[in-house]
Image (spheres, grey):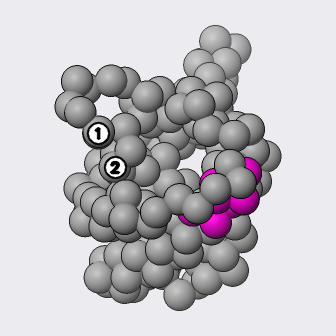
């Protein structure tokens, strides 16, 4: 009886790992590092996590979780409520439809797909932020943030793969 309970709890914890990791990245995105201007150009670790888990374990990253993650990021970072949630849901939808393109392919194809999808996500976020603020926002910081996110994706993916292999299975 106790063994079955422990096994269920272990399985439950393993299935919560992608959600817990993604929400941890939401909190990490708000940690002040003391670097002037870093908040404007910080890479989107949460976007990387959403993309990875939608590609490799979409059963553990449902749309409702993606929406809640986006709302949490909006609240933590002070963005207009719903902006990041809309962007993450767009990433979820596009990535979900292209999932078979990435599964079982070399990492460079996955990385290229991430670069294309994240470019669209940053462009959509930039447009929505301009509309919400009723002001033209210069795209230079958005493009730098996109470039930094795209460049750091391999390192983040390496961590996600380790979590996937050893904790989620």
State yes or no: discs 2 and 1 in contact (Cβ < 8 Å): yes
Residue 31, located in which quarter of the rendered image? top left
147 on left or right of 65: left
Q: Which residue is drawn at 75% across and 45% down?
A: 82
Residue bounds of the magenta highlight: 126-132
Residue 145, located in which quarter of the rendered image? bottom left
Which mark is drawn over residue 41?
2
- Percent across and percent down for residue 28 are 40, 30
Q: Mark 1 points at which residue?
A: 38
Residue 97 shows in this picture = yes
Q: Is residue 131 magenta?
A: yes
Q: Residue at x 22, y 24 (%)?
A: 34
47 on left or right of 64: left
Front-most of residues 90 and 15: 90
Q: Does the magenta stretch include residue 112?
A: no
Few, some or many residues within 10 Å of mark 2 (<14, 14–19, 20+): some
């Amino acid at each position: 009886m106790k063994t079955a309970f422990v096994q269920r709890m272990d399985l439950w914890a393993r299935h919560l790992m992608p959600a817990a990791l993604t929400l941890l990245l939401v909190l990490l995105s708000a940690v002040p590092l003391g670097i002037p201007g870093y908040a404007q150009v910080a890479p989107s670790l949460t976007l990387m996590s959403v993309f990875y888990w939608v590609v490799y374990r979409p059963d553990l990253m449902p749309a409702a979780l993606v929406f809640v993650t986006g709302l949490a990021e909006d609240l933590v970072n002070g963005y207009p409520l719903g902006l990041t949630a809309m962007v993450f849901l767009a990433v979820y939808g596009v990535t979900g439809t292209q999932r078979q393109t990435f599964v079982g392919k070399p990492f460079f194809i996955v990385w290229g797909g991430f670069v294309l999808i994240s470019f669209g996500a940053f462009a959509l976020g930039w447009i929505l932020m301009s509309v919400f603020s009723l002001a033209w926002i210069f795209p230079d910081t958005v493009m730098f943030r996109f470039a930094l996110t795209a460049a750091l994706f391999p390192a983040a993916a390496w961590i996600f793969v380790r979590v996937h292999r050893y904790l989620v299975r």
